[in-house]
Amino acid sequence: MLFPTAEYGIFFLLVFAASWAAVRWHRGHKALLLVASYGFYAFWDWRFVPLLIGISLLAALVGKALQSLERPAARKALLAAGVALSLATLGFFKYARFAAEVLVDLAGAPAGPIDLPEITLPVGISFFVFHAISLMVDAFRRKIPVPVTVLDALLYVAFFPQLVAGPILRASSFLPQLAQPPDSRSIDAARAVELIVLGLAKKVLVANYLATQIVDPVFESPQLHGGLEALFAVYAYAAQIYCDFSGYTDIAIGSALLLGYRFPENFDSPYLATSPQDFWRRWHLSLSTWLRDYLFIPLGGSRRGQARTLANLAITMLLGGLWHGAAWSFVLWGALHGGALVLHRLWSQTGLAAVQRVRAWALWPAVSRILTFHFVCLGWVFFRAPSVDAATDVLRALGGGWTVEPWLSAPLLAALALGLLGQATPAAARASLRDRLARLPLAVQGFAVAVAVLLIETLGPQGIAPFIYFQF
C-alpha cells in the first residue's frame, strides 16, 4: 500500500477515526493500531506477516528479560543471542544470494551455469530488524524509562507509518509515548497536514516526474545519451532521491502526528552541507545516528586514537552501504563515503599552514558546499545504477556530446530546481504560512487541502512508482 494512493487515504481515515474513538481504552487503542499495522503490511504480501511478528516478538521477550536480569554475563549473552538471531534473519533474506554469488566467483567459473534460487526480499525488513535491535540494545543499556510490554514492543516495531521505510525510531523515545494515551489537544494538526501535502508534492510532482522524464531513461541506457543529458540525469537523481525519501518521511511523520505520536525529523537540508560529515548530520538522520550509536561507538568510536577512529569511520560507512543493498555498487557507495569522512577528518585536524589558509578563506564555505554536493552526486551514480559497470557507463557518458536537445524543457528545469533548491526554504517562512492557514476557519482549511491534493493528482505523471527506500 503506497502513501500517495486512494487506498492509503481510505485506510488512514478509517484507522484515524477508529483509533481516536478507542483512545479511552488504552490497550484496545494500541491493539487496534497493531492490527491495522499488520493489515497495512499484509496488503503488500501477507506471507511475511509471521516474519514481522516473529522479529517483533523476539525483541519484546529479550527486551523484557533484559530489564529484569541483573547478572552482567547473562545479560550480555541474551543480548548477543537476540541481536545475532535478528541479523541472521536479515542476512538470509538480504545477503544469502549475494554471498553465494561471491563464493561462486571466488571458486572460479564452473563447468556449467549455476542456478541460484531467488529469495524474495520482505519489504522494509532492514527497518524493522533495526527497530528490533534498538529495542534490545536500549533495554540492555537501561535507557528505556518504562517497562517493556509485549503489546508496546510489537506496535513499536510494526507501527505502519514508519514500517517499510522509516524513519528509524528509538525504543527509548517511542515506548514512553506508548505508555500513556495520546492527547488530542496536543496535536499540531496544521503541521501534520502541511507535512502530508508537502510529502505528496515532493513524491508526485518532483520525484516521479524526474524519474520518468530523465533519470530512468539515462541510467537504463547511458550509451544512448550525451554528456549534458547524463549530467542533468545525475543532478535529477540527487533531487529525485531526496524528494522521494523525504517525501515519504514527511507523510509518515504527518500521519503519526495525526494519530498522536511524534517521530524524529529525518532530513535537514542535506544538499546545503559543507562537508561529508555535515552531509551525514543532515541526510537520513535516523539511520546516521543509529549507525553512530549502535555500530560506530561500540566499535570504539573516537576514543582509541586516530588510526582506530579512522578505521571505525570506514567500517561503519562500508557496512552502511551494504545495509542499503546486496550489491557491489552499494559497497562502493559506502566505501566512497567512508573514505570521504576519513579524508575530511584528516583535513579538519591538520596543522598545515596552507590548509589553514584555505579554511580561513572567506569563500571557502561556498566552495566546500559545491564540492560536497558534487561528491554526493558522484556517490548517487553508484547508488542508482544496477551495477558498478552500469555506473561506469553513466560516468563515461558525461564525456559525450554536450548539445542541448529538445528534452531540456521548462517543466524539467522547474522540477529540478524545486528538488534541489526547495530545501533551502527558511523554516521560519514555512512556520509563518502554517500559522496563517491554522487561523482560517476549518472549512476553509479543508477546502485548501482538497484543492492542493487535487492539483498534485492532476499535475503529476500517470501512476505512482514505489518509494526508493522500499527496496531496503
Image (cartoon, helix red, strand yellow):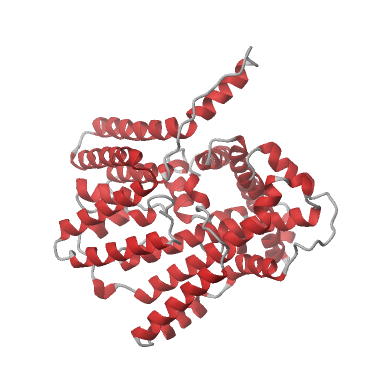
The residue drawn where x is 54% and y is 64% is 204
- Rendered image quadrant of residue 72: top left
Q: Which residue is at 57% across, 59% downward?
A: 208
Question: Is 321 located above or below residue 274 in the figure?
Answer: above
Camera-side residue: 278 or 220? Answer: 220
Q: Is residue 316 left or right of residue 349?
A: left
Asked if residue 445 lies left or right of residue 378, the reply is left
Residue 114 picture location, percent across and down: 57, 19
Q: Residue at x 72, y 52 (%)?
A: 352
Residue 128: x and y in percent read: 37, 45
Q: Using the image, determine if residue 23 lies above or below residue 398.
A: below
Note whether residue 128 is visible.
yes
Farthest residue, direction left: 25
Q: Position of residue 47 (x, y in %)?
A: 34, 38
Q: Residue at x 47, y 35 (%)?
A: 94
For the residue pair 110 and 139, the one nearer the viewer reads as 110
Q: Residue 180 appears at what percent x and percent y? A: 20, 61
Residue 264 seen: no
